[in-house]
Image (spheres, coloured by chain):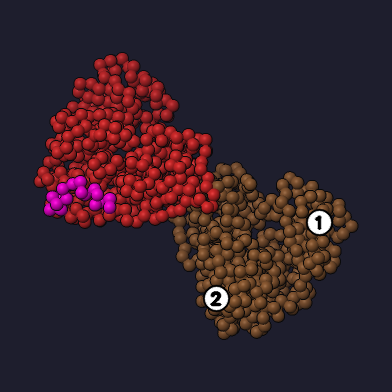
Chain colours: A brown, B red
Amino acid sequence: MKHSLKIGVSGVRGVVGQSFTPQVATSFAQALGTFVGGGVIMVGRDTRPTGAMIEQAVLAGLLSVGCKPVLLGTVPTPSLLYSVYRERARGGIMITASHNGSEWNALKFVDRRGLFLSPVHAEELFDIYHQKDFPLASEADLRRPQSRAQAVTPHFERVAGYVDQAAIRAARLRVVVDCCNGVGALHTRPFLEEYFHCSVVTLFDTPSGCFEREPEPLPENLAALGHCVRETGAAVGFAQDPDGDRLAVVDESGQPVGEEITVALAVHAVLTHHGKGPIAANLSAGMSIQRVAEKTGCELIRTRTGEVYVTEAMLRANAVAGGEHTGGIIIPAIHPCRDSYAGMAVILERLALTGATIRQLCNEIPRFALLKDKVPIRPEDAAHALRNLRRAYADSPMQFMDGLFIDFGDRWLHVRRSNTEPVLRLIAESATPAESARLIADARQALGLTTA
Amino acid sequence: MNKLRLASFGMRGFIGESLPPELVIDFASAFARSLAGGRVLLGRDTRDSSTMIHAAVTAGLLSAGCEVLDCGICPTPMLQYAVKRYDAAGALSVSGGHTAMGWNAVTLIGPDGAFLEPVSGEAVLDSFHARDFIKRNWQQMGAVVPITDLATAYFADMLARVQLDAIRAAEFTVLIDPVGGAGCPHLTPFAEQLNVRLIPINGQPSGYLAREPEPRPRSARQMASIIPFTGGDAGFVLSSDMGRMSIVTETGEPSSEEYTFPLIANHVLARQSGPIVTNVCTTRTLDDVARMHHAPLLKTRVGQAYVVSRLRDEQAVLGGEGSGSMVYPAFSHAFDGFMMMALILEAMAVGNCTLSTLLRALPRYAIVKRSVSCNSRDGYRAMETLKDADDFATEARIDVTDGLRMDWEDAWLHVRTSQTQQLVRVIAEADTAARAEQRAEEAVRIIQQAL
């Protein structure tokens, strides 16, 4: 199957060898350099085998418009974002297709706050890209690139400084981490050992970018992690995605708790040990986080799906924690971005301070049956399908913030276009798996798509 | 606007104007296609823009699945030497060479270490223009392998071609000015192996060019002014890629770059017979040297690619140009500054004489170089006018191998449009300075009238 280039709010993404070429990467780097007006631009990448090639193209593009690229090498996305903020860089580029397969790669654009470009700014960037009229720097104005070793250290110190490091160290926790052969393979063991004195077992810990499990930390992809947690008697299992922004937890019995419970767990930990305040989550993040908000008496702000929408809402509301249903935990006091390291730290802290098990902690959070599904769809057919759905559910309360969100009170259905793939994402939540499955099946029928 | 120049063996443009990274990626991708994504050597000089172009080239080569042996900062001739040694399909050099700050170039090198042959080069240009590239997926992606041990083998192989003991015994003091370019890191090892006391000028790698990078007497002023006080036996002024060189004698006389090749030819032909190759606008001194040694002298278009190509076809013993360059095929297929220095020092050591004595042995003519500003469209018309000019052209022998060459009994004149600037370049050489001056003046006047 041929994949065309996808230019959107999550950056520019494509399959290398098809639409994502070094020429595209260099032009986008030139566009970002032009957009931010020169200066220091941080560049990081994940472990994908195409990352080194794209990095060189980005380097050339940034230099050509007079920027000073600082290469951080293979680092987690949150480390890059924090570095941009901390070092007052003009911007950043992260080379990662996150949870997509090895054949994909992408550029994600970062503003001077260390946040992904807002949709409005992203559009301005794309305008510059399409006009291709980059002001090239003369030889005398060219800057020299720099490479930065140990670029994760300031980020990790920031995370460790947020939690009760002494308590975690004293608890001597045993932890299993599934690094998905991504950036975690380089950085997560030292993070847990040096900062938290954990006893660490790692899985999929070759930084090769060849993913030996499906890169999304979905429950069904975490069998090996669950097995290893049981075998080693670990207190918790953590699964990262290839660029280290998303996290999923496996409990002490080896059972994945699910990404939305992982987020609820981390948010609950922040609200309990670091003070209350508003929280934010996207529409798909489910009813569990809503119950956490209700239980702690905190306001929950719902946003569209997409990290930028959540972080922007959080900054506006001064939120203390939040996240996305895909296991993206955001703690603005560390840095307002999805950060698996922040997530691991607050969950370890909660284990240490309460002496409870993951299972016990999860039991404090009401659970529902969340079911996710996706339907391949040509972009031109998506609007029509969504209209069919709207007609079919015309009697139910709806929100149009992001695709279609239908709220039935004790259950809900969310259907939206993916920001990253040519698919419709269907998410339903209710009290029982059977009920959720029925919601999805009904929705598929209402979309007017025949595929099973 | 300084325009992009494309040739079958490379591309040259001006930073900030005509050499954006996207075009460089295209060009590298086109080259990679012609090599079917094989092994490629890559090197660059020290200019800041070379870092940018190096990155763009790397991206292009990797995307086509090439294995990139990255020599980092590396003189072009050293890179050319390495192609066969590393069994590479080709090499790519990023260097501004002798051109002024702001210019930079990508040079393509074939599997034998010479500039890419026109036939292969045309295939590169075709795929460049059609944007027809190999695009590898993530499993076939190329990889970069850093190469750091190149110099040792290069110098060992080179110095096996000269009488090293004689040079070492002479204990020369030598001034070398590599204009802060790619040669800098290699001067000390080179000097140590020759047992030479080295006095470097502009010897630190630098993105900034401390002088005009073209080796000419006016670029040698700095060296000429200090050499007598240092007890230096020889001074060498090089381009930033180590491909061109001019000489300063022990007395502080900067010699025209035209005499670099004749000087070496006079030395090499004394022990080795065979044809030599040069371009159509090199000094008559070389004709005299060839005649003295009964060596056939073959003439080609201007440029390393043409000279080396002919040299290989004719199995010549030596090639070179009046720009201050020489190729010694016993060692490599590159214009090589290090090889030139080694051969000149050998000539001094073996002959037990000073550099100025060696130079005095060469017949001398007076050379005048002029330029007329003229855009590239009008260059051809200017030359046609000159060719047909009454009186001026009637008694001359005309040669149009490259530009226009006119020969008279006592003088010759060569007119050619510049590759880098909006100029027509005029070179005149004659027995006397007055005669050369007169020929050049006449030509300039006729060209200016034509425009």
Q: Which residue is drawn at 51% across and 43% down?
A: B134
Helix, strand or loop at disc 1? helix
CA neighbours of label 1 inside 10 A, class few (<14), some (14 to 19), many (20+):
many
In front of the other: A170 or A248: A248
Q: At 24% from the left edge and 34% from the top edge, which residue is drawn?
A: B316
SS assignment for the magenta stretch, majority: helix
Report how far apart the C-alphas of labels 1 and 2 lie in the structure. 43 Å
- Amino acid identity at mark 2: Val
Q: In this view, does B3 lie to the left or right of A281?
A: left
Query: Which residue is most to the right?
Result: A395
Residue positioned 73% across, 45% down in the render:
A380
- Residue A262's image quarter? bottom right
Which segment did they paint magenta? B153-169
Q: Is residue A42 magenta?
A: no
Which quarter shows the C terminus of chain A?
bottom right
Point out residue B79 in the picture as x, y percentages from the top left corner. Answer: 34, 47
Residue B355 in percent (x, y) is at 15, 44
Q: Can residue A361 be seen in this view?
A: yes
Give the chain of mark 1.
Answer: A
Horizontal side of residue A115 vs A399, given as left or right: left
**Residue A18 on image: x %, y %:** 58, 46
**Contact check, label 1 and label 2, Cβ < 8 Å:** no
Q: Residue under mark 2: which chain is it in?
A: A
- Depth order, front residue of A275/B79: B79
Q: Name the residue under label 2.
A: A200
Q: Is residue B375 above or below residue A149?
A: above
